[in-house]
Image (tube, rainbow, N blue to C red):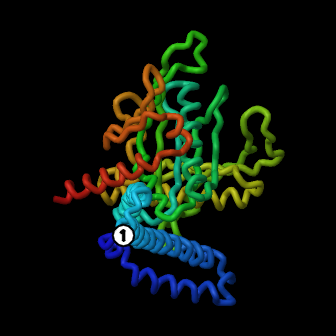
C-alpha cells in the first residue's frame, strides 16, 4: 500500500482535484462544451482513483483493529473472518497495483476497439460478435459506458466488424493487451454434421484522442461517402442516407459510423475514430513496429494470442502470459480481469527486458 501511495502521488492528485473542482464550479464552464467534458471527465477519474485508494486504506486499518480485538477476546470466529477479509483485501491490492503499472503515454485514455471476423466463415462472424459482447459485459460490470460507432453484420449470423469506444479511465491501458488474434475451437452450431470448427477474430485497440493531440487530417486527403445504414433482419433501417464512411487516402484507413440519425453527427463521430487510428499509426511508425499500439491482427492460423476452447475440453488460455480459465462461459460473459491483469504484468516485464 505504501508503494502504491508513492506511485499514485496522492498529494499531486489532491492538488489536481482541487484545481479541477474550482474549474467545475465556474459559471462559464459549459461555454466551451469540449473543455467542460474534458474537465469533468478528468475530475471523475481522479476522484474514483482517490476513493479506491482511501477505501482500501480504511479496510486495512479496520482489519488490523478487528484482528487485535479478536485476539484479546479469544474470538476464533472473528479471527477466521479476518483471514477471509485479508484474502479479499490482498486481491484488491493486487488489482490496484496493476493500475500503477499503467504508465504508458496513452494508458490513461479511453479505449477504441475494432473487432473483425477472420478465417472461419460464419463461425468467425459469430465469434466476433461473442467477443464484442464479452468486452461490453466487462464494461457494464465496471459501470463503464460503451459507445458503438459502427457494426457491419454478416449475412447468416454474427458480425463482419464492429468499432466501439469504452469510456473508462485507463481504458486503453487495460484493454490494449487484448489486441491481437483470438482463436475459437468448438462444435459449430452452424454445421449440420456437428463437426468441430476453428475460427479466428482480430481485435485492434487504440486510444481515444483528446483535443490536445495533434493529428491533422487534410480535407483533400479524405473521401466521404454516405449510405443508408441498416442491421440484421428484423431491425429497422434508416430511410435516409445518414451513415458515413471516410477513407483516408494516404494511409488507406477506412472508418464508418452509423449510430447517429444525423449525417453530420455520424461524420463527426467517424472523424474521431479516424484520428484515433491515425494516431496509432503515427506512434507505431515512430516506434518502428506496428505492434506497439495495434497488435497482431492477421486473424489466421499460427498467430493467435489467446485460445478459447469449448470442445473437446473447456479452457480459455492466453498464450503470452499462460493465464487460463476453466470457465469459458464466465469469460464470454465479461469475466476477463484476470487476463487483463496478467497481460499488463507481462507487458511491463517485456518492456523492462527490452530496455535492459
Residue 282 visible? The answer is no
Q: Nearer the viewer, residue 312 or 25?
A: 312
Q: Which residue is mark 1?
A: 72
Residue plotted at (54% across, 47% down):
135
> In percent of the image, x 78 and y 38: which residue is there?
235
Residue at the far top in the pictured view: 193
Front residue of 273 and 232: 232
Residue 198 on image: x %, y %? 46, 24
Q: Position of residue 328 (x, y in %)?
A: 49, 34
Q: Which image quarter holds the N terminus?
A: bottom left
Q: Determine whether, in the image, residue 35 is placed left or right of residue 309.
A: right
Above or below — where is 17 with respect to 335? below
- Quarter holding the C terminus? bottom left
Q: Is residue 227 left or right of residue 44?
A: right
Where is residue 127 shown, x and y percent of the image? 54, 32
Task: Identify the image quadrant of residue 23.
Answer: bottom right
Front residue (pair 177, 219): 177
The number of discs equals 1
Residue 196 versus residue 83 in the image, above or below: above
User: 10 Å neighbourhood of mark 1: few (<14), some, or many (≥20)?
Assistant: few
Residue at 35% from the left image edge and 34% from the top image edge: 303
Where is residue 105? Give x, y as percent.
Answer: 38, 66
Amino acid at each position: 500500500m505504501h508503494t502504491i501511495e508513492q506511485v499514485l502521488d496522492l498529494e499531486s492528485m489532491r492538488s489536481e482535484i482541487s484545481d479541477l473542482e474550482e474549474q467545475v464550479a465556474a459559471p462559464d464552464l459549459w461555454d466551451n462544451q469540449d473543455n467542460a467534458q474534458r474537465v469533468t471527465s478528468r475530475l471523475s477519474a481522479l476522484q474514483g482513483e482517490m476513493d479506491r485508494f482511501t477505501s482500501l486504506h480504511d479496510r486495512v486499518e479496520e482489519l488490523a483493529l478487528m484482528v487485535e480485538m479478536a485476539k484479546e477476546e479469544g474470538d476464533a470466529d472473528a479471527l477466521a473472518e479476518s483471514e477471509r477479509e485479508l484474502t479479499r483485501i490482498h486481491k484488491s491490492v493486487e488489482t490496484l497495483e496493476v493500475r500503477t503499472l499503467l504508465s504508458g503515454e496513452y494508458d490513461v485514455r479511453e479505449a477504441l476497439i475494432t473487432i473483425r471476423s477472420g478465417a472461419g466463415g460464419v463461425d468467425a462472424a459469430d465469434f466476433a460478435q461473442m467477443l464484442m459482447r464479452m468486452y461490453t459485459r466487462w464494461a457494464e460490470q465496471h459501470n463503464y459506458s460503451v459507445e458503438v460507432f459502427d457494426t457491419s453484420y454478416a449475412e447468416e449470423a454474427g458480425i463482419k466488424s464492429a468499432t466501439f469506444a469504452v469510456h473508462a479511465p485507463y481504458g486503453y491501458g487495460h484493454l490494449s493487451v487484448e489486441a491481437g488474434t483470438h482463436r475459437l475451437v468448438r462444435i459449430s452450431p452452424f454445421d449440420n454434421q456437428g463437426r468441430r470448427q476453428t475460427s479466428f477474430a482480430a481485435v485492434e485497440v487504440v486510444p481515444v484522442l483528446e483535443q490536445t493531440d495533434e493529428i491533422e487530417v487534410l480535407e483533400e486527403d479524405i473521401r466521404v461517402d454516405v449510405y443508408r445504414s441498416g442491421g440484421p433482419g428484423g431491425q429497422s433501417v434508416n430511410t435516409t442516407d445518414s451513415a458515413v464512411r471516410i477513407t483516408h487516402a494516404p494511409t488507406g484507413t477506412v472508418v464508418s459510423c452509423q449510430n447517429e440519425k444525423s449525417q453530420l453527427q455520424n461524420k463527426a463521430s467517424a472523424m474521431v475514430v479516424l484520428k484515433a487510428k491515425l494516431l496509432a499509426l503515427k506512434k507505431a511508425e515512430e516506434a518502428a513496429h506496428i505492434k506497439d499500439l495495434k497488435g497482431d491482427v492477421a486473424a489466421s492460423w499460427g498467430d493467435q494470442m489467446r485460445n478459447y476452447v469449448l470442445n473437446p475440453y473447456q479452457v480459455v488460455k492466453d498464450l503470452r502470459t499462460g493465464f487460463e480459465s476453466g470457465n469459458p462461459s464466465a469469460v464470454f460473459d465479461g469475466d476477463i480481469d484476470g487476463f487483463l491483469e496478467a497481460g499488463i504484468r507481462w507487458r511491463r516485464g517485456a518492456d523492462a527486458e527490452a530496455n535492459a
